[in-house]
Amino acid sequence: MKVSFRIVLVVLLGILAAAGVLVGWFYSGIGLPKLSSLNEYKAAQNSKVFASDGTLLCELRGDQDREVIALEKMPDALKKGVIAIEDSDFYQHSGINWKAVIRALWANVVKGEVVQGGSTITQQYVKNAYVGPKRTLWRKIQEARLAYELEQKYSKNKILELYLNDIYFGQGCYGIFTAASKYYGKDPQQLTLAECAMLAGLIRSPSYYDPYLRPQEVLERRRLVLNRMVKKQYISEEERDFADKEPMNLVGPNQVRAARRAPYFCDYITELVKREYGDQQAFRGGLRIYTTIDLRLQDLAENAVKRQTDPDDGPDAALVCVDPRTGYIKAMVGGKNYAASQFNVAADGHRQAGSSFKVFVLARALADRVSPNESYDASSPRIIELPDGGKWKVTNYDGRGSGSTTIRNATVHSINVVFAQLIMDVGPARVAEMAKSMGVQSPVEPNPAIALGGLGVGVTPLDMASAFGTLANGGVHALTRSISKVTDASGNVLDEGKPETTPVLDPKVASEANDILAGVVSSGTGRGASIGRPQAGKTGTTEDHADAWFVGYTPDLVTAVWVGYPQGRISMGGMTGGSLPATIWRTFMGKALEDIPPTAFSKGDELSPLQTVDTAPSETVTVTLCDVSGLLATPQCPSVHSATFRNGEQPTATCNVHTGTDRTVPDVVGRTSAGAISEISSAGFKATVVNQPSEQPAGTVVAQAPAAGTSLGKGGVVTIFVSSGPSRVPVPGVVGMQESSARATIAASALSASITYTTGSPVGVVVSQSPSAGARVNVGSVVSITVNRSSNGGGLFATSALFLR
């Protein structure tokens, strides 16, 4: 007996000694991970986009839908409910609840595997933030040690705040803020006791305790939480009984979030933030993005487009409004119906500008000291002889014209033949450069046709609003900005979008242009845009009537309006820039400026930022320029003209096309692309290929520039225009996509979508399409897609087919 007692005593002492050694080792931390050596964990959270007045516009959500909030913004009932059900001794232990650990250890030994965790709230947070979910004994030891360290670093309330912002509540919701919004459609502070108990009960197994799939089990779990709260004396029995009788009152499982305001602008900001900060920061970094959008102006802009267009038929429209003094974007409408098409014409629709591009020819001429009263032949049609030997036939809009007219009158009445001659005088390359300097960021080819906004011009409404803003601001260009400030989740400023301005035109030149363009509205093609205050602008209509523009401005705001079909070059019959675009502009700007006193344009009397005290604006110099390059002519230049500049503003580089080693450009029209490139190279030139739709067989050269027989310096560039065949595009594959993504993909391919719904799952996913992916069809063709819907239908799904135009 004594021997047995001694053996038992020795074993117990050995166990106690081993336990002591283990406890000592645990608290010493030897061989265990240290919190200080790990990267600081930051819970992923949504980024938010705000309007200029602080109104929330939209959120950028990643794979973890989360918004971090302070503990003070969480209801006491929630905190107590979570502690009662998850860790009743939370405020007593130091990160590890040893009683729970021993209980879990015994259960694990009995079962022969890890079946119970005994984890405290602190350990659960450490598991999610640092260790990971794998169930091993070593992982549990690491978790416990880090939990102990975390308790030394933070207060209990801070740990509880971290936990409640990080933990998963099911249905894609991370953190209490998103969970309260998802299940109850409210902020956490508005939750009732019953609602707090329900959410606390989800934490243990959110996939099992899904209130939409297992409401009875969730109610039983809620009752358990309430009973635990009574046991902890957090609530009375009367409060428990009252809460237990409360229905769950959940919002619908597939309830669509409230429609975003300014949806096209939100998409524009999303892409901008992704490019600037990367997807990780944009969707998981909790950025706070403060934009320049003015919601009053945005609403007015959307209403103007909506009122003046047919939601189901006819052309689309886009609008951009900018403050010319700061470059801040104040309103952006990318189309008349965001639900039908998410393609943002305002920012991404590169369209021919028509006669609105004449403004850059005018600005270049005025800057070159060409008098607006200089006369040109207005006879129509007119054949313009090009420097490369080609001929350019130009006609006026109405096909008529005779005699001569001034540049001023040609601008007011948009006379094409005058501007065709004027661009040849000032140089296409220099006009393209002027457009770029004034704010056009889209590429502009330096060919004569840009004078009429045709070949070589593909601009966005944002481009045009930015560029015309240079005139509105007295010749000073303000870089367009959509973001005024960006902070991280902690409030640290990452970027401040302060205005960035650059002098481009002498104030007197800008004033002269404004005076001429004011005539467009008062007595010319833009009379339909008049709002009875100092204003200026220019209409634009392409030859095929596929694009119609009005871009106008006051000293306070500049607005560009485009009308057309985003999916392709579809004629609108007799549509002109002075009709619907001018009407939309007038509808918007009349309201936008109704509370702002009329302001006259500056007369440009102040000293120009482009001048110095020592250089008077009257000092000029006349130089001879090459018609092809626009640079100082050499003896080898076959066609030249004289131009007058302010001293210091004239070109200084000599022609880089006609270098004295000229060769003859071969005729390659009609040849294959490969054969043409080979022949051009053999002749000592470089070939540039431009693909364009044509009825000629694909791969055939349909045009070239310079023309065959032209003299060109060795190493010069010959551009060949190669047929890509008829204007057909491949059908994108959208099966398996969500409906909204499929719509956007089809629209981006210049096609329309016909949508039919069928009962099935997963809901909202495209299950079939016709034509199939990869088939080539004409631009504007219809792609039929079938989308799954829930069996109860309703709402959007009540429509059997929705056509995107």
Image (cartoon, helix red, strand yellow):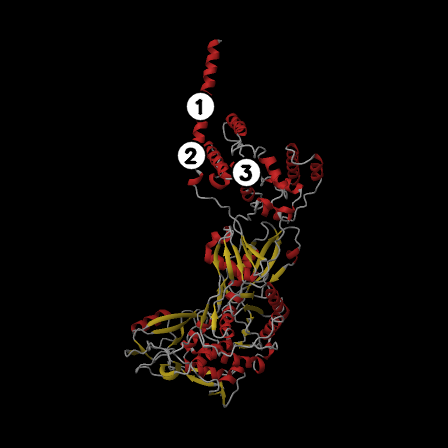
2 vs 3, front mark: 3
Spatial separation of the CA atoms under disc 2 and disc 3? 23 Å
| SS at badge 2 | loop
| Coordinates of residue 461 in the picture (x, y in percent) | 52, 69
Mark 3 or mark 1: name the one nearer the start of the chain: 1
Query: What residue is drawn where x is 59% and y is 79%?
Result: 527
Residue at which label 3 appears: 156
Q: Which amino acid does label 3 sit on?
A: Lys
| Coordinates of residue 507 in the picture (x, y in percent) | 47, 77
Label 3, residues with CA under 10 Å away: few <14, some 14-19, many ≥20:
some
Q: Which amino acid does label 1 sit on?
A: Ala
> Front-most of 480 and 103?
480
| Coordinates of residue 259 in the picture (x, y in percent) | 61, 57
Label 2, residues with CA under 10 Å away: few <14, some 14-19, many ≥20:
some
Whether pointer 3 and pointer 1 mark residues with C-beta atoms closer than 8 Å, the reply is: no
Residue at which label 2 appears: 32
363 relative position to 168: left or right: left
Determine the image quadrant of residue 755: bottom right
Query: What residue is drawn where x is 58% and y is 49%?
Result: 762
Residue at which label 1 appears: 18
Spatial separation of the CA atoms under disc 2 and disc 1? 18 Å
- How many marks overall? 3
Mark 2 or mark 1: name the one nearer the start of the chain: 1
| SS at badge 1 | helix
Mark 2 or mark 3: name the one nearer the start of the chain: 2
3 vs 1, front mark: 3
Whether pointer 2 and pointer 1 mark residues with C-beta atoms closer than 8 Å, the reply is: no
On-image quarter of the C terminus: bottom right
> Front-most of 603 and 266?
603
> Front-most of 695 and 154?
154
| SS at badge 3 | helix
Whether pointer 2 and pointer 3 mark residues with C-beta atoms closer than 8 Å, the reply is: no
